[in-house]
Amino acid sequence: MVSPIYIVAIGLGVAFLIVLSNTKLFNFSLILLLLSLIAMTSISGFWLTHYLLLFPLSIDFPYEEFTAGFAPPIAINLRMSVFEAFMTFAINLFSIFAAIFNWKLFKENGKYALSIFLIFTMAANVIIMTRDVFNMFVFLEIASIATAGLVIFTQNTISISAGFKYLMSTSIISSLLLLGAIFGYVSFGSLNIDFYIIPILPDIAPVALFLILIALVLESKPVFANGWALDMYESAHPNIGAMFSSITTPTILFAIFKILPLIPESWLTVLGWIGIITFTVSNFLAIRQTHIRRLLGYSSIAQTGLMLMVLSFASELNDYFFPIFLGFLITNMVAKAGLFWLRDMIGPDELNKWNILRTKPLYYFLYIIFIFALAGFPPFPIFFAKWHLLMNLNFTSHAPEIILLLVGSLFELIYLSNWFVLTRDKESAQESTYRPAWNQIIPLFFSGLVLLFASAFYLNNLDLWLFAFPSAVVLLFFFIDFVPSWVKTVLAMVFVAIAAYYIYPLVQHDQIRLLFASLFVIGSLLTLIPTFARKEKRLFFHAYFVMVITGLLMLVVAGKNLEFFLGWEYMTLGSFFLVERRSLTKNTPLTFMIFSGVSAYFLLAGFMLLNQGGVSWFASIVKSIPEILIPGLILLLLGFFIKIAALGLHIWLPSAYAEADDDATPLISGVVINAGVLGLIWALFSWKLLNLPSDLFYYLGWLGALTALAGNMMAIYEENMKRLIAYSSMAAMGYVLFALSFDMHLGVLIALYYTIIHFLYKTMLFISAAGVAFRTKTHNMYEMGGLIKNMPLSFIAVLIGIIVLAGMPPLAGFPAKWMFYNAVVMKEWFFQGLIVFYSGIVAFLYLYKLIASVFLGQLKDPLRKVKEAPIWFIIPQFILIVFLLFISVFPDQILQPLASFVPSMFGGEQLSWNGTLANTSFGYNDAFAIMNIVMIMFAVLFTWLYINSRKAQKVKQFNIVFAAEKPFRPETTHVSYNMFAGYNKALGFLVYPIFSLGWKKVAEVIEDVAETIRKWYNGNGQAYALHVLLFSFIVYLIIFGGFAL
Amino acid sequence: MTIDWIKLLFTLLGLFIVLNWGLIQYGIVRRITARVAKRIGMPVYQPYIDLIKNYSIRSQVSHGVMFYLGPVFRLAGGVGIFLFMPMIYDSPFSNYSFAGDIILILYFMFFGMLGMALGASEGGHPYSFIGISRGLSQFTTIEVPFTIAVLALAVQHHTLSITDIVQAQQGNIWNWNVFQNPFAAAAALLAFLGMMGAAPFNIVMAPQEIPIGPPTEYHGTYLGVLQTNRAILYVTESILMVNLFFGGATNWIELLLKSFVVYMWPVFVSTVFPRFRVDQSVPWFLKVPLIIGIFGIIYLYL
């Protein structure tokens, strides 16, 4: 039993000793500092092990240290329960690494710096442990003065004025606390909060508690009264900023936690509101920030607000309180500190100067995990914390807070990913000669390790092999990034194969899962093949790739909403990285991330509502309350609509697909888009199973039809072949949505069938495009032409792809069209049907453009020596062709089993089969016969032509009938650019970009508002002091004015 | 798959009749249009002469495999529509319509079109590209009124089978769909003008403007194949209209006469109208014909 008083004793003693020591003994002092921090950590660690490992039963009987040997209220008592043990352990351990990181800073600033640092840490310890309000006041003052001392380590006018503003504001805050202590003493007869039970003077007691609370809340830097804190974050040395977020913040929050039992329940609501408004507004204002330290300050304050809200919900969250709170706390401590430290290492405060990191993979990796841990992505603790927070809050009583939370999280995601995306441009990053020093490396890696360890701890609650292990595999790929590309590809394939083997038994009895698992596995393997062709080093490319695959596979084995969402977020994050790697402008990945974020928050909100109705797995809802289910499922649908790029939510899609690496696009488009379909199918199945209003299907029908039309219409005006194919994906998803909306057996069958063939042809087309771009080094179709002679195999693949896409007999697309017609006339949805059929024909325009501009027409001079795409591109294409041709000849072999996948709740007519002949009550189709007839006819006619013109002479390129002239250049003869100008003139108004412009306007308004509100922080110390007072006054009015009671 | 030789024989016989009727019809039409222009015009048998001449030319060039296959695709498209179309109601001349219904015919039209487009494009002639882009553009909107007419018929008779649609029109002239659903018929007939590519919708071939569009580079046997296709396709598409709206036919004479009369509709229109611009021609089908087509649907519910 080591008394916690030694923490204080060591801290104070060594701090004084260092000041008194000779300057020549500086190195010795430094080591002494470290040793004392280690000793303090050990004491906390001792108590932590005492409660958690050695004597778990004593956890309910916390140790009390009576200073001066008297029991309170005569003397001050320090408590060391498991909470204090944990908190002091965390901050002391952190201080060790902070001290190591500050090594150089200390050397520059001398022994007084050491002393201040130690005092600061010690003060934090006491604030955590003490039960005495006055003692708390004293040590808060000590901490404040120490903080101001730390701020002016950086000696310039800005930091000195910031330090002064800080002192001004915190002294007001401390005075409030002191007043609270006085009132408390008067009303309870004690300074010790353990005695704040039955007041002697009940009238004064609330005022006392209010003053104590408001002082601590003000210390947590609530929004609009935190200008002093922001200026301090901005001007202090980044290492000191790290300490504010990682030591001060947890300390203050713990102090609030300590007095929570004293606070009346009605005040908690106000506390929660202060927290959530701080969270949302700080994140909102951070969007416009370009200064890294200030941005991190905003982020810290926002997170603190969120934790404050969590604190106010402590009793409601019950058992989940600690995992949630600690999830936020730990991530914020290590990730925020990590980012501040990186800022110290990297140098500039401008967001866009951090591209230097891309030349340093290890630090870049740390940067990635810090950023995305804060943004709340899995597997990091905040992801789980947010999840459990939402799942355990009662939506009906906390709806506004929850909405603010989601909106605030979106803002947070925006500025964090904006910062990340700005580091995209590797070319302009100067090769840095800077070598990080040992004292910087150790703490950074420590932060990274803590984060990963904490993540592992949270992941541990899920199925080890299905969720935790794959996460580890993704991590592994980050660490083996140095090995040759082909090795990583092989490893990734092995991983997919093993995963497939392992998940097969889990999905084989659920046909929808089996179907999508097959798509994802086959898709992953096939899209991995082309990566063999690229030998150059691509930072973390394979890790991102594997992350997407892992996410996809998690989706099909998910049995709970959380597991599904985990997979979804992995998939999204991986896709984002792949999009971001090469993007031309920052807007592309950013838009992708914002839309994906909105999608994720829709899902989160949907899952939350379902959870309130007792539904833990949205795909098989047995029974629940319709009032909750309907909005819940609609929110899920909205989330999935974004992923399938339904009209209005599609603007992220074309650029994202076009600007991703060529060999990544097949995965993130052809394969990943099916995740949205899977979600859609599951959500709609639940909708149907529960007999919820079928009006929904009617609206979905229109949405699907218009999406199909818009996608195809926009595709025809594209000059970039990847954007063209991307728009075509959007249209294909429109078809799938339209098919699902029929709300009948045939419709679901079409959706499943179309999903399969779309997967096959779209993956193939994107691989073809990648192969072509690999050789031609361009995506602009008008720069190509006549490549059929150089790339015949790619041409064949594209040809088959477009015939299937167009739905022309005799290939696999036609049965889909035929079923669509049957379903439309059965359902009598003429106008929606007409739009869909029209859009199907519009597709011919861009399909022609795609194949003719690239492969036909005039070969350009720069491309004369272009060779066929590498074999690694050809292999997957031809595997896909084999699949497509098989389905073309024997669609019955696919459609018949698929029909059994459709749940029986979907009524309506089914296809009846007579051999290879498919029948409905309207029409019939025999794909096998059609194929035979067409093949024989074609062969006969070909023979006929061949007999007649077998001696046809091959002529050179320009040997054409050209008004008796020889064309001047291929460029003047190849009609490709703006090929459908006439169509544009006639019907171009249909593609007026209302949605792009609309969203752009939304973004502008948000930025303008943020810019305006930001001016509240005018940098004036007096104004800041006034803010503090006004804040207290307003909260006082709210609490005592009857608003909250 | 066993081959039904009798059926094949009947089908080939039908094809022979249709081809010859197509050639003669084309000769007659040329003659008529010449007379309208106060010319004498070519002999009625001129298409035969052209065909024989073109098939006989031995000096030929090729721009590549796809160029070579283009006419094959085109002719396969025409012959395919013929093969999948029931010719004479209640007779052995039902061809291979057992394989698919009206949807198959609708989509098989694209087979030849797209194949030809690809072949012509490999020729690398700018006029080919321009013609094709115009043709595809125009076809997107032509299909709209036609599709809505087909949907109306399908719902009216609860079938997508052409044979069944023909059957439903038997017995009385009033059973013809042109009387049963005049709006649908009108929409389809207006779309038919575009399908035939006659003026004012002849923006694809567009003589004197982009002579002669997609087939610019085709000559000799290729051109012969294309001419063969034209003969078959025009008759077959007219027969489609006859089957859908004019009661079909129970014998060859009825069929050929009806299809001839239907075919005269675009011919007459084309002799009096000049050519549209692309941006006039494309949206035209989305105006009056579409509105009429929508009436065709509403009519079903009245």
Image (cartoon, coloured by chain):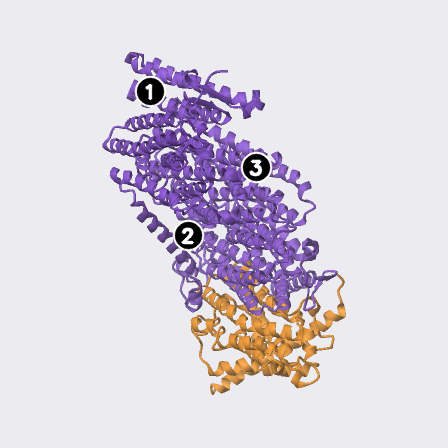
Chain colours: A purple, B orange
- Disc nearer the start of the sequence (1/3): 1
- Camera-side residue of A963 and B80: B80
* Mark 1 touches mark 2? (CB < 8 Å): no
Q: Is residue A951 visible?
A: no
The image shows residue A214 at horizontal and vertical percentages of 37, 37
The image shows residue A801 at horizontal and vertical percentages of 57, 55
Mark 2, secondary structure of its residue = helix
Kindly indicate the quadrant of the structure image that contains residue B100: bottom right
Residue neighbourhood size for the residue with mark 1, other residues' Cα within 10 Å, grouped as few (<14), some (14–19), many (≥20): many
**Residue A279: mark:** none
Task: Give the Cα separation between the discs numbered 1 and 3.
Answer: 49 Å
The image shows residue A926 at horizontal and vertical percentages of 69, 63
- Camera-side residue of A825 and B42: A825
Task: Give me the chain letter of mark 2.
Answer: A
Name the residue beneath numbered marker 1: A114
Q: Quadrant of the N terminus of chain B?
A: bottom right
Task: Report the side of B254 relative to A722 (left or right).
Answer: right
Task: Report the side of A938 relative to A31 (left or right).
Answer: right
Q: Is residue A593 above or below residue A183?
A: below
Q: Is residue A886 visible?
A: yes
Q: In the image, what residue type sits under mark 1? A: Leu
Q: Is residue B178 above or below residue B223?
A: below
Name the residue beneath numbered marker 2: A861
Kindly indicate the quadrant of the structure image that contains residue A428: top left
